[in-house]
Amino acid sequence: MYLKSLEISGFKSFAKKAILNFNSPISAIVGPNGSGKSNVAEAFRFVLGEQSIKSMRGKRGEDLIYNGGGDGVKVNRAGVKVVFDNSLKAGQRMLNIDFDEVALERVVHRDNSNEYFINSSPVRLRDIVELLSGAHIGASGHHIISQGEADRILNTSIRERREMIEDALGLKIYQYKKIESQRKLEKTEENMKSVESLRREIAPHLKFLKKQVEKVEKVQELREELRRVYKEYFKREETYLRHEKEKINNEKSPLIKELETLNNEIIQAKRILEQSKNRDAKSNELIVLEGLLHKIRLEKDSIMRELGKIEGEIHAGERTISKEREKQMKDEFKTVYLRDVEEIVKKIDILKSISEIKELLFGFISSHKNKEDSALIAETEKELIDLRNKKGEFEKKLKNLDENERIKILEYNELRQKIEYEKDSNRDAEKNIFKIIARQNELHGLINGIKTREDKLILEEESFKRELEEAYIIAGRETSDYRGHLIVNMDEDRNHQYERLKSIEKIKIRIEDSGTGNSFDILKEHKEVEDRDTFLARELNDLEISKQSLHNLIADLDARIDIEFKEGILKINAQFQEYFSLMFGGGSALLTVIREKKRKRKSDTDLSEVLSAGEEEMIEEEEEGEEGIDINVNLPRKKIKGLMMLSGGERALTSIALLFAISQVNPPPFIILDETDAALDEANSRKYGDMIANLSRYSQLILITHNRETMSRAGVLYGVTMDSGGVSKLLSIQFEEVLQVAK
């Protein structure tokens, strides 16, 4: 058994919790009319996801909730839970979920809100439907026949009849997938229209931007040409300016130098004339200089004698020290650190006189000599230091006297030459002054001419700088690349530069006339719009592929549904004929696939024809409608072939035979039959009982009945009663008790 139990709480007349356990292949629910038996069947519909309140005999969701009455208290929610045995049987589970027991629960509230649960976990209705569809279970399928719906399959349209049979054959899952695919296809087509609409919207702007980009590209070509001409112009112009500047400097420099020389010459000539007036004073100065020179030379001789004496004493002291130290070197090795030597070298570079250097060296030697040096060396070195100091003082005095003597000799010779020169140069000086002034005037004229050219060159340099800045703005800083390609020799005519300037101006005018504005923004916007269009085109292609894929999937599903439906019809017809013959003692029954015909007005196709046609001609055309199932029966010993000619009992037997035939072909886990045997007489009730007994081998049966024969076939009997408060209550009876009740 797949169906284990049903729990009802607050649903319709079941105000309090009621539990039905289904541990028998056939369970029967009995009770008086109006006791709430059919509410059990509707509870099954409810928990399995039925959305039509009308099919459960209600108008609103709150009609499914116990509303109180009598002593009963109104409740705010209704809940139904059904439990399935989902353990592995023949290597597979009934429900495609990895649980041995599956509990489905649905709760409805007064505000019409619904909650769905699978094993106490909240889920969507869709999850419930998908789970049950794999087991051929649905809210309103062939396996739940409510009261008065036994012959529904006979009264319904051919299309609805086909849907019922498809559901029974387990094709609902394919239909669900088909509907989902069709929904996706519609969404895909909507998306395609949206994408196509977006592409149409951006197409004019993209076309405009392409034209702008073409202009920008043309401008870029012009700018590239402009950069080329600019580079050629700039490298030649800079070379020209540099050469001209060098040329002017080369011409101007010697003239200025000559002018400076002439200025010095005229100053000198004027000085000569002035010096002739002071010739006597210079002779007296000459006598004084001779006396000073004599005095200096006498003092030098005295110092030289003293220096000779001191150097002799120093030489003797050094020999004494040298001998003493040679003796000591044999006894021990003295270490002098390199850094100390480096330090003394640095100090030597700073000192100026030999005496200071000697003093420093002796001090260095003294600082590094052995503490155990002899008293002789110490005393001798002390004397040497004094001698060297004296020597240094005398050498300094001697040096000063030498320098003073040299200066006085130069002054003496210079003064003597001046006195001699002045005598001869006075006459030449006056003549030279007039020549110099004439040449100065000539040089000033030449320099002024060069100055004019220099001013012009400065203006050309300023113009060059302005052109360079303008080039940076218009053509970019790439124009500065010309500096690496300067021309060494400038030998072309200057007019060629003027022609290049004209070409530059023409290109600039063409760029300005292009009216492209900010080319970067245009290129950026074009790239963005083009990328957007490319993305949309790619998206449209993907959608087209998806559309074709969905078309193929729908076609495959249609083909599969058609094949399995036709195979199922053949099986159902075999069972239908068997059950029909059993119920009626012969005859024939057959399901046929037909396509209904639909009439349409000519006005639906051509309005102009309607205007000229009569009323009779307006309803003549037919078209093929939807495909469905027709039922053909032929009763034994009667000339009845159509369903419309059957009596109520015959229709009930026919519908039962068809329902049982459908259930045999693809047996559902359970079947609920609500008083489908109500119209049967005693003989047919026994036949009905035999059929449900046979059917219980394939499907679990829940029978709502008043028929004693039907009750006798049940293993468990649930009695439903209703108290004064309108609340349904359950009473269960085991099989043995059922037999007693049935007798």
Image: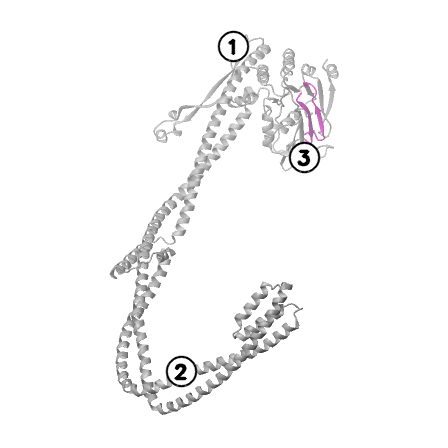
Q: Quadrant of residue 730?
A: top right
User: Is 307 above or below relative to 139?
Assistant: below
- Residue behind mark 2: 410
The three-letter code of the residue at mark 3 reads Arg
Label 3, label 1: how many angstroms apart (C-alpha)?
55 Å
Of circles 3 and 1, the one toward us is 3
Which of marks 2 and 3 precedes in the sequence? 3
Q: Nearer the viewer, mark 3 or mark 2?
A: 2
User: Which residue is the site of mark 1?
Assistant: 639
Amino acid tagged 1: Lys
- The residue at the point 27 percent across, 81 percent down is 437
Q: Which residues are magenta?
A: 1-26
**Image: 87 above or below 212:** above
Residue sticking out furthest to the top: 637
Label tally: 3
Residue designated by label 3: 77
Residue appearing at x 58%, y 64% in the figure: 339
Q: Is residue 352 left or right of residue 723?
A: left
Q: Secondary structure at mark 2?
A: helix
Marks 2/1: CA–CA distance: 169 Å
Give coordinates of residue 238: x percent, y percent.
32, 61
Would you say residue 412 sits in the magenta stretch? Answer: no
Q: Is 198 situated above or below 585?
A: below
Q: Residues within 10 Å of mark 2 (few under 14, many from 20)?
A: few
